[in-house]
Amino acid sequence: MRVLAINDISCVGKCSLTVSLPIISASGVTCDILPTAILSTHTGGFSGYTFRDLSEDIPAILAHWKSLNLKYDIIISGYLGSIDQIKMVKSIKKDFLKPDGLMVVDPVMGDNGILYAHFNQKFVEEMRGLCSIADLIVPNLTEACFLTGTDYSSVTESSYEIILAKLKKFCARPSVTGCDISKKDDAGKQTTSCAIYYTDDNGATKIYSTEKIEGSFHGAGDVYASALVGALARGIKMEKAVQIAADFTKNSIAQTALEQTEARYGLNSESQMYAYLCELHQACKHNG
Ligand code: PXL
């Protein structure tokens, strides 16, 4: 099983490839990487970062890979620095994904209702085009709102299924992470959970929720997407893969909150990796 992760290298502030490569590799499959840019830190919460766009290097990298006849079972794309890079990912899918392979797009563009630095409406439209050639997309709620033209500030619990239905118009199996839902616990007390609305292997809408941990945690989307790809690469069905990835992400957030590290430095997912791998192992055993 061979996976290609297309994403930037943010040297500090765990996200993108510094998250994807260790998690997908640890899941037990080959993870090759295509770095789209090198930054001294990611762009969310730091100022003065360096940003080297690697677009110029990509054609020669791909030409070399073609000479090696490389083909991938899964390709996942994450942070893309320009519209040209979105176009490159489309052609990478054509040239390098096996006919029965899985194209996963994490349309990294924003959080908490706003776009990250360097992105604009034109980029959102191009990203929608990339999502339309994906098998699976994993936007957070902010990105799902931008992709569907939904006003983030007016989103309520009843909006989530509507947003998912709008995403389904251009991608067969969308999901949306970071959907807050309120529930009553066994004692009748109102609590908030953090849910993922997703589409299972049969096209049905499913919801999986975990305990909500207050705060904004940078890199959580990258941990979730990577853990999901790791589980899918191991042959685990979507429903179980979502549960395993969501639990791993929630546990990583809980550990980060406990340690009170600055959110911009990313999640402590390292401490939860062993538990994640045990879950994968169990799920694979049940798969026979
Ligand atoms: O985690 C998403 C992400 C990835 N890569 C870069 C980013 C961000 C979010 O800020 O800036 C460079």
Image (cartoon, rainbow, N blue to C red):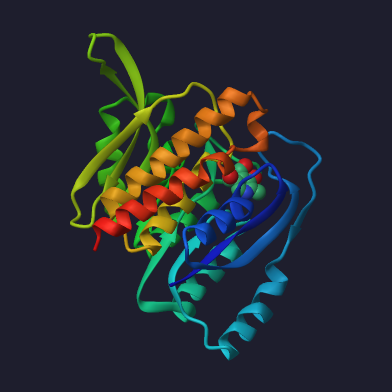
Does residue 12 appear to the left or right of 276 in the view shown? right
Specify the quadrant of the image occupied by residue 135. Answer: bottom left
* Position above or below: 116 against 52: above
Image spot of residue 152 (x, y percent): 42, 30
Quarter of image, res 183 = top left
State the residue at coordinates (50%, 75%).
91
> Which residue is at a point 53% across and 52% down the rendered structure image?
122
**Viewer-nearest residue: 89 or 4:** 4
Residue 256 pos. (x, y %)? 58, 30
The C terminus lies in quadrant: bottom left
- Is 182 placed above or below 231 here? above
- The residue sitting at 39% across, 63% down in the picture is 233
Mark yes or no: residue 145 visible: no
User: Would residue 54 appear left or right of 182 to someone viewing this image?
Assistant: right
Where is residue 267 shown, x and y percent of the image?
Answer: 59, 37
* Position above or below: 267 against 64: above
Q: Is there any visible trace of residue 114 in the rendered image? A: yes
Task: Determine whether, in the image, residue 133 is placed left or right of residue 118.
Answer: left
| Quadrant (top left, top right, bottom left, bottom right) of the N terminus | bottom left
Relative to residue 216, is residue 11 drawn left or right? right
In the image, residue 43 sits, relative to residue 34, either above or below, namely: above
